[in-house]
Amino acid sequence: MTWENSAITIATLLPLAGALVIALVPRQHEKGVRALGIVITGAALAIAIAITFTFDYGASGLQFQLDTRWIPAINARYHVGIDGISLPLYVLTFVLSFLCAIYTWRVVPSPGKTKAFLALMLLLETGMAGTFIAFDLILFFVFWELVLVPMYFLIGIWGSSNREYAAIKFFLYTLFGSVFMLLGFLAMYFNSDVGSGVHTFDIVQLTRFAASGGFSHAFQLIVFAAVGLGFAVKVPMWPFHTWLPDAHTEAPTIGSVLLAGVMLKMGTYGFVRVALPILPYGAQKYAPWIGLLAAIAIVYAALACLAQRDLKRLIAFSSVGHMGFVMLGIATLTSIGIQAAIFGMVAHGLITGMLFFCVGSLYDRYHTREISEIGGGVMQKLPYLGGVFAFVAIASLGLPGLAGFWGEVMALLSSFNPAESLSTPLFRAFMIAGGIGTILTAGYFLWMLQRVNMGTTPEKWKTAVFADVAAIEWVSWVPLLLGIVALGLFPALLTDVTQEPVNALLGLFK
Amino acid sequence: MNQAIDYTAILPELILAGTIVLVLIADAFLSPQRKWLTMPLAFAGVVASLIATLWLIGEDRSTFGGAFVVDSFALLFKVFFLSVALIVLMVSFRYFREGRFYQGEYYFLLLTSFLGCLLMPSSRDLLMLFISLELVSAPGFLIAAFRKSDPRSNEAGIKFFLIGVLSTAVMLYGMSLIYGVTGSLNLAEIGRALSGPLEPGTQTLVFASILFIVAGFAFKVSAVPFQFWAPDTYEGAPVPVAAFLATASKAAGFAGLLQLMFVAFPAQYEFWTPIFAVLSILTMTIGNFVALQQRQVVRLLAYSSIAQAGYMLLPFALVSANPTINEHAFAAAVTYILIYAVMTLGAFAVVIAMSKESRGLLITDFAGLSRRAPVIAVAMTVFMVSLAGIPPTAGFWAKFLVFQVAIERGGIGTALAVIMLVNSVVSLYYYLAVPRQMLFEESEQERPLVAPALVTAVAVLATVAVVAVGVWPELLAHFPPLSTLVGG
């Protein structure tokens, strides 16, 4: 047991252990439970930060590896590791979970049950973090599915009025996608051969096997479809997105933050980590279709946003659009495109996570999310909250100098010049669609700000006494706001990390 | 034909048989207030039998002219059946003590059924197989009707009985035909006799008898279209009896079926695998879709057990000329049965805990249970999630092994795997119905629900098992003994 081979395992499993501890604390210690939640997520975050400091940014291979026996009968191993592609998402998971734990200090949504709430949140954290470090397909799948149950209960118990429908819809949709993914994994397993007829679930070994031409073209086409379906539902790509607005709208604030901030990235990460390297031929053949769906998603989501009356639903649809940019970047199969995707994932995690925090706090005060009910004047009524909200909304629409800009502009740039195997005119058409999407995005966000923030406070809210941003809210928000600015000003913070592994990945397409 | 009987080999059965007699005698001499003492007596007998079984591990014995065999396969199932017996006894105790039941007779009949279970995996002969199957079923007919004052329980018993004897008759007819064709009752000899090319007339006869025998077992494992009895019987019977029928009784059916198909009829696989494919698809699909509409929790579990039987039948449809795949299919089926039984027993334990205050056992009666009995509620959630096959629970690995063989088999296997996948997604909806009530809804009552200690113990034990196997499937993933039956 050294720091090198155990750090990521400890950080990942710490929240799980914490969940068990929390389950055992007597119910009376309400505040103690919340403090415990902050301590556990904080400790996990501390380890994650220590990992970023000891990470070797010059190397392109896996670091912090641990590869040990787990289920010899099927040759599934406990193989975890981290590289430049997973590191940003891994750290993002811990950051957002920690901030959510802090946010929970102030209020646990109705109907209370603090212990269960925090225990489920910690379970979710383990599942999400584990997905980003698993290098064995079965381990990956187990972590992937581990997030479903806690999220189902977070939405179902602490959600708003239509929560049961949203929770089950979320669960069924993602499960439906992921079971096909599992079939795809099994197909990869049985068609792999790492010497003397031994099959493997190991992602690194499968990548090597695929690079040596192990998987036939027909095989790749079928399996990419199965695996891609699982990832596409999770992203979610249009037309599999319909679970997302419901889930987001009904989920409690921190549920939405983690859902948008981290969980959606599991899908796009899956494409980059599993589907592309192991099935490169399939990726090339499907890339135009993925690009097409991404372009549709961008425009469709923007149009849908224009029609929303519920703030949370609006942001949920904007997520569909942003994930469209991410998928467009991946579909180009270029270094810039895939780096744009990773950048987009992190930026979206920070920005949209923050947007959901803002909407959650607005709801805590107004007890409504209807734009027309709020009726404008938030800037007058709650200047700080309104200011933060405006800032994040503008970051989300892709203002240069803030994090949201780079992911989008790099994605568009890469689709101007996609990989050689892809049709340039086609991707330029997607770029134009994406461009229209950015304009519409700016449109609906500004219009939303105009209707919510600007104007004068309506009569009915004049007399209401609302507290502006509370200290604890500042604590949980400031890191995100700083992150948005930092990544906007210094995009190299992220691209320096991702460049090496992405180039290595693209080497497989030569 | 005088031959020495290997008493060591049949020691577990002897102990259990002795206990059965003791229970019946003790019951006659105990005053009504003390009738409950028969349960500890029965429990002790089962423990003794379990110890004798564990003693036999690693041995390979055969007696009664090869009709009764003790090998790893048989021992695995015996240990399993005896453990289930202990659990069923534990959850029965308060239920039968507090209701107005004949306790002594109940334990007597229950153990008799378990004696049949115990004989089943050792039976390598059609006659033994038939006797064990009947020994499992016959007492079952009686204890299903044990809530005598309730017409639904009477209905449960009668329905179970009528369909049971009908299918038994059909099966017996099939067995007699096989005997006529091969001149042997021994499974291995039948397998050898049928492995060569057969005359067309004989072939038809063999096919017909396989069909009859499969039909008989399909009743036992409640496969569509022989499933009608199950929901009504489970609902009407005392809940611990339903738990027994859904687990031990069903597993006994599968143990017999496995031996027949993999030992006696492997040569005819081209004939019977499509039958199993159809049975499996129909069973899981109908089970799942009807389960979606259930409001009563025992009926829900009954349809769930039908759907799960469909998953267990799937490996049979994967048998081919490739011995490695057959071995894997066999292992997948056995593992599935064992894991299924643990999850289902746990779920029934929770239902038994509820049965005292909720007569109708509607799903809505579980509302707000997370506040009233957090331990039970968490346990039930784990069982339901596991039955739906979500990792990291044991139920996932059970399904995973089946998927794995199906994909390995390719061809029809892939198609079956896809159907099973869609089914397991559908099943999630109704499995979550119970946690939904327990966690999302508020109860009208605030008073904590106090479950009997033994029942809580069973629920906790099963939860630990389900999660432990889920995280560390190696605990169950390899049964070195399994190949003995298939390969040899």
Image (cartoon, coloured by chain):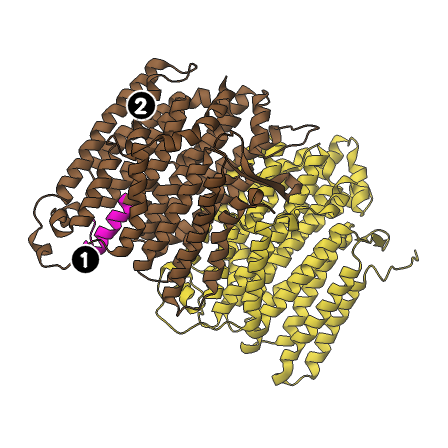
Q: Which chain's residue wears label 2?
A: A
Residue at left 33%, top 25%?
A410
- List x then y, in percent, for residue B169: 67, 52
The residue segment tinted magenta is A355-369
Residue at left 78%, top 64%?
B52
Local secondary structure at mark 1:
loop
CA gap between label 1 and label 2 equals 42 Å
Q: Residues within 10 Å of mark 1 (few under 14, many from 20)?
A: few
Tell which of B233 and A459 is nearer to you.
A459
- List x then y, in percent, for residue B463: 55, 59
Q: Amino acid at mark 1?
A: Ala
Chain with yellow colouring? B
- Lower position in the chain sequence, tag 1 or tag 2: 2
Q: For residue A381, say whether it is visible.
A: yes
Give me the disc on residue B204. none
Residue at left 40%, top 36%?
A233
- List x then y, in percent, for residue B164: 62, 56
Q: Nearer the viewer, mark 1 or mark 2?
A: 1
Chain with brown colouring? A
Question: In the rendered image, which residue does mark 1 sit on?
Answer: A467
Tell which of B322 and B99 is nearer to you.
B322
Tell which of A306 and B163 is nearer to you.
A306
